[in-house]
């Protein structure tokens, strides 16, 4: 099928981060985030932190904000379950939070172990008080994250942007 | 069952010594008694008190230390809180901030919940864990002299994060409670650093 040119969304998200003055990015690696992680690591103006588990990034982002730095967190949907109690911190302190979540367990998923958390991701985030936005096309991802930086860092909101597995493509085994 | 009170350091006295000459140090406290201990020494705009988010104190300290490299950041937390974030110690060691000090007030018990024995009371050595992870300085403090030495040593610059385990008596002191309004404490803290509310 012929498709109109889609944006190189990881490259554009890196530009979105730069324009929004995001100076710190933490992550547990995910294949869907590879290109964005690489760009952030290569950016001399950004500090990156690799985490052992995703909730660490929630606490680090809160500390960064206390010190005046905008921090974003990259993770896979399975990591959202690790974050729930730590999300109490940005929710109750009204600390800006921007987490980009690449989805598993929802589209051409080969590994059934990904399904329970993938399908509970949105409900879990909403239950703890995080605003959930979703994007399923490259253009939507860029526009959604772009405006989410305003909602988070200027509007003091706690935002998760879910990036659909359909966009990320089927994992090759 | 409460263990015999084998440790000599008093938590409130130890925290008072740590904070006596704090200068422009930024302080983050772990939920429960460490929050009360720091508040008991005196409320301060440069204190961020956690009342929850267990396992988050040292990592809030890491984010803050990275954001404010010109300021020393001191995290004061308990053994139970830090045990929940052993992986976080690895993240801190790998990030290698040179302005982050972690002090674990270790009574080897969960004091807030009925004095159940914690892992440090069952043989886990947090200072050895931190040393294995590559902390620039990691030690266990059991006496007043060692505490004085720790405080003296902490005035020197560091090449990486430092962790000290203070073995304290397992006893609950009267609660000294700071505001539980996390937004108020946040805005007060940021204003101290010249940042706008938000």
Image: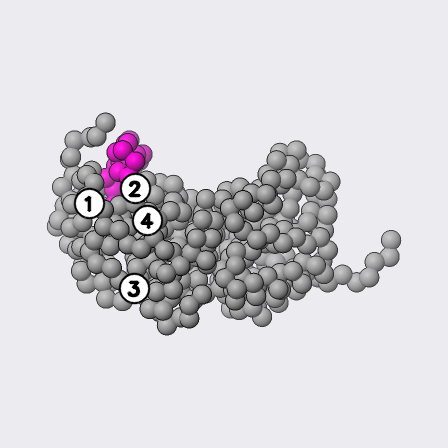
Q: CA distance from mark 1 to mark 2?
A: 19 Å
Q: In the rendered image, which residue does mark 3 sit on?
A: B45
With respect to residue B191, does B55 lie above or below? above
SS at mark 1?
loop
Residue B104 magenta-highlighted: yes
Q: Residues within 10 Å of mark 1 (few under 14, many from 20)?
A: few
- Residues at discs 2 and 3 both on one chain: yes
Q: CA distance from mark 2 to mark 4?
A: 10 Å
Left or right: residue B77 compared with residue A81: left
Circle 2/circle 3 CB separation < 8 Å: no
Q: CA distance from mark 1 to mark 3?
A: 22 Å
Dot in front, 1 or 2: 1
Can you tell which mark lies on residue B30? 4
Left or right: residue A5 compared with residue A12: right
Q: In the rendered image, which residue does mark 1 sit on?
A: B174
- Residues at discs 1 and 4 both on one chain: yes
Q: Which residues are magenta?
A: B103-124
Picture residue at 26% right of the left edge, 45% below the top: B33
Outermost residue to the bottom: B194
Disc 3: which chain?
A: B
Q: Residues within 10 Å of mark 2 (few under 14, many from 20)?
A: many
Q: CA distance from mark 3 to mark 4?
A: 17 Å
- Residues at discs 3 and 4 both on one chain: yes
Dot in front, 3 or 4: 3
Identify the mark nearer the N-term, 2 or 3: 3
Q: Position of residue B177 (x, y in %)?
A: 26, 51
């Amino acid at each position: 099928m012929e498709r109109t040119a889609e944006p190189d969304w990881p490259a554009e998200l890196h530009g979105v981060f730069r324009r929004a003055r995001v100076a710190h990015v933490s992550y547990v690696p995910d294949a869907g985030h590879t290109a964005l992680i690489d760009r952030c690591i290569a950016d001399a103006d950004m500090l990156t932190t690799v985490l052992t588990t995703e909730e660490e990034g929630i606490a680090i982002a809160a500390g960064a904000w206390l010190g005046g730095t905008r921090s974003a967190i990259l993770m896979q949907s399975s990591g959202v379950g690790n974050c729930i109690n730590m999300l109490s911190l940005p929710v109750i302190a009204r600390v800006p939070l921007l987490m980009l979540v690449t989805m598993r367990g929802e589209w051409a998923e080969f590994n059934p172990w990904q399904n329970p958390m993938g399908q509970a991701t949105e409900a879990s985030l909403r239950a703890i008080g995080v605003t959930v936005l979703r994007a399923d096309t490259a253009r939507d991802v860029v526009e959604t994250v772009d405006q989410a930086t305003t909602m988070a860092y200027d509007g003091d909101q706690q935002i998760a942007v879910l990036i659909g597995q359909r966009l990320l493509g089927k994992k090759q085994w | 069952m409460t263990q015999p009170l084998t440790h000599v350091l008093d938590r409130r006295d130890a925290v008072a010594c740590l904070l006596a000459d704090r200068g422009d140090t930024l302080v983050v406290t772990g939920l429960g008694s460490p929050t009360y201990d720091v508040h008991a020494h005196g409320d301060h705009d440069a204190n961020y008190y956690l009342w929850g988010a267990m396992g988050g104190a040292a990592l809030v300290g890491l984010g803050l230390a990275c954001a404010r490299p010109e300021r020393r950041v001191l995290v004061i937390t308990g053994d139970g809180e830090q045990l929940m974030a052993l992986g976080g110690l690895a993240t801190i060691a790998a990030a290698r901030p040179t302005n982050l000090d972690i002090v674990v007030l270790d009574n080897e018990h969960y004091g807030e919940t009925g004095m159940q024995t914690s892992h440090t009371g069952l043989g886990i050595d947090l200072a050895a864990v931190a040393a294995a992870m590559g902390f620039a300085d990691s030690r266990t403090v059991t006496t007043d002299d060692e505490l004085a030495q720790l405080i003296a040593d902490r005035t020197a610059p560091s090449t990486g994060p430092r962790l000290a385990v203070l073995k304290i008596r397992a006893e609950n002191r009267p609660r000294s409670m700071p505001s539980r309004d996390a937004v108020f404490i946040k805005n007060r803290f940021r204003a101290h650093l010249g940042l706008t509310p938000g």
